[in-house]
């Protein structure tokens, strides 16, 4: 029998994250699991918060050359291109249960305007200038950075990295305390 704690954590973290979003939602909002992302909140005014959850039992799942990182941005940009997400009404969250050294994802998250987003993309290109078609992230990176730069700028302006710990229950406890008060 094979032990699969990592993949199980990856799926099981979605439910506490959905509960967290439910606790923060308002009247008329809907929270979904595995609809427009791992966890998605559809606000009563049609705004969307789409969240992807990345977890690891041993280290940072969002390193610069992480397939999880680049596939997440690939999926978001593809959803925008396919008309599934309206870029003007969408916030993009990436939740992880592990922290690591500051990296590309942190640069993306700290960008607060178009100029900072462009600087973050330039930083990513510089950090990954040795990536070729042979690397596992290439199809995602190429689509995101080389083929869809204008949409990537829009996504980064609406992007936030959320770092929790464990299975995400600490955030729920904090929200429950806020609800009590």
Image (cartoon, helix red, strand yellow):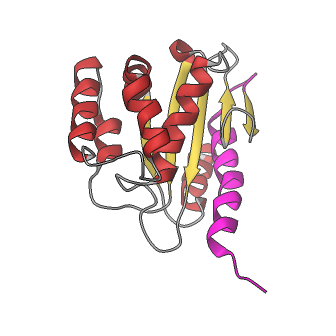
- Residue, x 28% and y 60% (percent of image)? 101
Image spot of residue 167 (x, y percent): 60, 64
Image side of residue 106 versus residue 151, left or right: left
Quadrant in which residue 179 is drawn: top right
On screen, residue 64 above or below 123: below
Vertical relation: 49 (above or below) 80:
below
Q: Is residue 20 magenta?
A: yes
Residue 160: within the magenta? no
Residue ranking furthest to the bottom:
1
Q: Point out the image quarter for the C terminus.
A: top right
Q: Which residues are magenta?
A: 1-29
Position of 15 with respect to 93 (left or right) is: right
From the viewer's side, name the closer residue of 110 and 149. 149
Q: Nearer the viewer, residue 14 or 152?
A: 152
Percent of width and height locating residue 27: 73, 24
- Residue 24: image location, x then y, percent: 62, 37
In this rendering, position of residue 96 left or right of residue 169? left
Q: In this view, which residue lies farthest toward the front?
A: 134
Residue appearing at x 26%, y 33% in the figure: 120
| Looking at the image, residue 159 lies above or below residue 168 | above
Residue beneath the point at 51% across and 32% down: 92
Q: Residue at x 64, y 19 (%)?
A: 82
Residue 173: % across, % down: 59, 57
Give the overall secondary structure of the magenta segment. Answer: helix
Q: Quadrant of residue 141?
A: top left
């Amino acid at each position: 029998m094979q032990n699969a704690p990592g993949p199980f954590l990856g799926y099981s973290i979605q439910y506490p994250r959905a509960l967290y979003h439910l606790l923060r939602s308002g009247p008329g909002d809907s929270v979904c699991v595995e609809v427009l992302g791992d966890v998605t909140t559809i606000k009563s005014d049609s705004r969307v918060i789409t969240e992807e959850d990345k977890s690891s039992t041993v280290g940072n799942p969002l390193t610069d050359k992480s397939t999880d990182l680049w596939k997440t941005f690939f999926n978001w940009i593809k959803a925008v291109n396919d008309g599934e997400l309206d870029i003007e009404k969408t916030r993009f969250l990436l939740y992880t249960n592990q922290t690591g050294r500051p990296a590309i994802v942190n640069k993306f998250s700290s960008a607060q305007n178009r100029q900072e987003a462009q600087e973050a993309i330039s930083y990513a290109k510089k950090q990954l200038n040795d990536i070729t078609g042979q690397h596992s992230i290439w199809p995602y990176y190429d689509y995101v950075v080389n083929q869809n730069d204008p949409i990537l700028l829009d996504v980064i302006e609406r992007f936030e990295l959320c770092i929790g710990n464990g299975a995400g229950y600490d955030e729920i406890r904090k929200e429950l305390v806020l609800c009590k008060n």
